[in-house]
Image: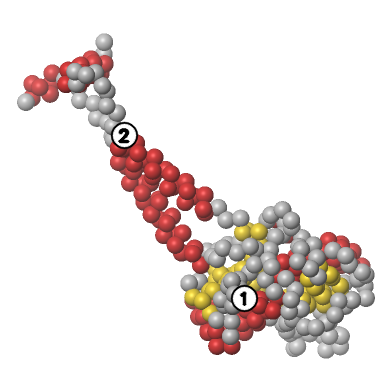
Amino acid sequence: MSTVEAHRASHTAKRRRRRPGGAIALNLAPMIDVVFLLLIYFMLAMNFTSEERAIQMDVAADQQAPESADPFALPEQPIMVIVRSTGDGAQDYGLSTDSPSIGALHSFDDLARALNAARTAILDDDQRFVIAPDASTRWEHTVAAVSAVRRGGFNRVRMAAPEGVALR
Amino acid sequence: MATRVYQRGPVKVQANLTPLIDVVFLLITFFMLVAQIQRTRLEALDLPRLSAAETSKAVHDDSAVVNVLPLGPGGESRGYRVGARTFAESPDGLGALVDELKRSMKQQPSANVLVRAERTEMYERVHPLLAAIAQAGITRVHVVTVDKDGAL
């Protein structure tokens, strides 16, 4: 028997002697302390994981640099993307553009595809886009239009003031 | 006294780790709570849904988070919230919002502006906010979305 074991044995023996009933009492207080701490810790940590994502967009009407620009260049017109909410569902929306090079659109995916096709053929890489919702267009449709333009490969996109331009 | 010590054999020194772990976890919890309190500026909103591929992770730290508060139960406007401050949806309120944004941009010129609004929010309520942000001299914002099923 090693010294440690001997020590333990004598210790238990002493305790047994002190408690003739033979009940070994487990001290629960520190365990409860630690368990509660862990519980609070994990509850907080769960709360922390944010699933929020973000998509970039311009807000100000970006000015063209007048001095450095070629004086004979034609003023570059932004393409207007008109988006309207037509019902209460997420899929109830209408979409059109004022560009003749982009045909009829049925979905945001259509817009992204059309822009991808036009980017290589017709449009400049830094072509500007203006999303034109009206007052009652829902935010999810407005944001989805921004996302579609960015998926189409264009990064210069902003939102216009709400106006009464009809969907084509 | 000395004889009693030697009777027990060599002294075994053991570090009691329990109080240390207790205190360390308490400190961690404390600092997480403090950080959590700082995050109360994030309103619980039903954000627009976009697939993750089109977006980047929203960084809330060191950015100005601007919330469009949803309409109250009676359809009354509850305005906009920047940090802990709420601004009315009126010319005065928007003017104060512009000042607040200008102030925070002066403090942290590199800060992002995050725009949070419910996905069902009408554009007429979001646009005054975007106009105020532009008026504060900010040229780029991050629109906050979530990655969920039903992405458009």
Farthest residue toward the front? B74
Total numbered badges shown on the rendered structure: 2
The disc labelled 1 sits on which kind of residue? Gly
Question: Which is nearer the eye, B152 or B17?
Answer: B152
The disc labelled 2 sits on which kind of residue? Leu
Q: Is residue B123 shown left or right of residue A72?
A: left
Residue B68 seen in the figure: no
Image quadrant for the N terminus of chain B?
A: top left
Label 2 sits on residue: A28
Please report the residue visible at 73 percent of the width from the left and 82 percent of the height from the top. A161
Q: CA distance from mark 2 to mark 1?
A: 54 Å
Residue B127 in percent (x, y) is at: 67, 79
Question: Which is nearer the eye, A29 or A50?
Answer: A29
Residue B112 in percent (x, y) is at: 59, 70
The numbered mark at residue B53 is: none
Chain under callout 2: A
The image quadrant of residue B91 is bottom right
Please report the residue visible at 84 percent of the width from the left and 70 percent of the height from the top. A95
Residue B133 in percent (x, y) is at: 61, 79
The numbered mark at residue B75 is: 1
Q: Secondary structure at mark 1?
A: loop
A76 above or below A46?
below
Q: Residues within 10 Å of mark 2 (few under 14, many from 20)?
A: few
Chain under callout 1: B
Q: Is residue A31 shown left or right of residue A135?
A: left
Asked if the residues shown at circle 2 and circle 1 are in contact, with their CB atoms under 8 angstroms apart, the answer is no
Farthest residue toward the top? A1
Looking at the rendered image, the disc whose residue lies closer to the viewer, 2 or 1, is 1
Image quadrant for the C terminus of chain B?
A: bottom right
B128 above or below A7?
below
